[in-house]
Image: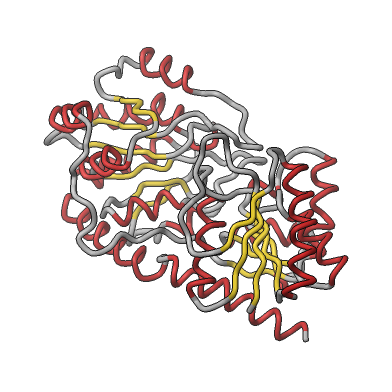
Amino acid sequence: MKILVCSWNYPPVVGGIEVVAEQVAEGLHGLGHEVAVLAAALPEGAAEAVGTVDVARAAKKGIPRFLLHAVREGGWRIRKERPDWIVCPSLTSAPAGWWLSKRYGVPYAVLVHGSDLLLESKAYQAGIRPLLKGARVVFANSRNTARLAREKGVAEARIRVVCPGVVVPAAGGAGTGGVSEKMKALAAEAEGKPVLLSVGRLVKRKGVLEFIRDVMPRVRAALPDAQYWVVGGEPGASLIHRERIGGALEVAIRETGQEAAVKLLGRLPDADLEAAYAASKLFVFPCLDIPHDIEGFGIVVLEAALKRVPSVATRCGGIPDAVEEGVTGVLVPPGDPEAMAEAIVELLKDPARIARMGEAGERRAREEFNWGAVSARYAAGLEEALAEGR
């Protein structure tokens, strides 16, 4: 197939959709398809991401400039190369895919991620309706996101559930070289203690504030030396999340007297993040069930699984697709601090079970969620829909 990927979200900008967009493009290309990418302007001072596909960038920043670039460049490429598909890794890019499809008759597919279907703006909801209706295929990142798409009027026959993947490191992986002195000291101080880890942007739906305030005191009542490390910073260029909760986290730590137990580590370089995973016993993903901001899937759960760190997470959004309950982790109801604390303490007291879950999680992440396997599912969905449309 010839595929034109039209993506506002693309590396070197950092983010979950950016990773998905790049891996879809590179993965489809790796399967032998002809792929070109239309992307937003590079951030100032940033270098182009290293990859194998052709990336055509907008000359100026901003979504309007990107969409204009996508329409112009996309039209030229369609006339010249006649691709089989336009693939939009997010609804932000879909207006260009919709227009190009209408103008030139090339079908488009759009990837939806969960919260992008739920924003509480009447204008936004009116705007995405034709984008979803016009797509030949809507790829949902979880069964829950597929349900939301159906509720928006997308026909079941046009929906394909393809969960995101993870980048699986080469056998042997990287060593611990390059770990900062600060991280070495923190790991040494925590040696022998049960360390819980969360990684991700500091947004309300992640539930980190409630975990610090309501769950950690319960965990520490049973295991006084338990530690909780939080890796991640405030959301940057997100179009959805404007909240800033870092200050509230610091207040909660002080008010619960957990300065020695809870560490806000901010964004970490790769070597320090590896060291944090190596020091941790469990990954915690205490997401909240917020009506208009859900966790679409939970790639971080799979990233932890690759490190043999099982998860204790909440049963909401698309998380049940990321955690195989009782096998690679434990799921508890959202908003139930007692249940989460109980699950964590029970696991921490059973190292053999943690080890079994860690092994199962790593195997599942490597075999089922490597990007090669995931890209093949995207390709199969496109090929199937293309055959049906002929």
Residue 243, how many percent across, how many down?
Answer: 59, 26
Which residue lies at the image location 42% right of the left edge and 43% below the top edge? 285
The colour scheme used to paint the residues is secondary structure
Viewer-closest of 350 and 2: 2
Q: Residue furthest right?
A: 103
Question: Which quarter shows the N terminus?
Answer: bottom right
Q: Residue at x 26, y 28 (%)?
A: 220
In the displayed structure, 163 sits above or below 190; it is: below
Instruction: Report which quarter residue 318 is drawn in.
Output: bottom right
Vertical order, 269 against 384 (above or below): above
Q: Considering depth in this image, is 125 or 225 the residue closer to the camera? A: 125
- Identify whether 303 is placed above or below 185: below
On-image quarter of the C terminus: bottom right
State the image coordinates of residue 204 (x, y, percent, origin top left): 54, 31
Residue 247: % across, % down = 47, 17
Image check: 89 left or right of 283?
A: right
On the image, the x and y values in percent for residue 388 come to 73, 84
Residue 307 relative to residue 53: left or right: left
Residue depicted at 45% across the width and 72% down the height: 373
Q: Determine the image quadrant of residue 389.
A: bottom right
Residue in front for this viewpoint, 357 or 297: 297
Count up the numbered dots: 0
Left or right of residue 221: residue 91: right
Q: Is residue 242 above or below residue 132?
A: above
Which residue is located at x 57 percent, y 50 percent?
10
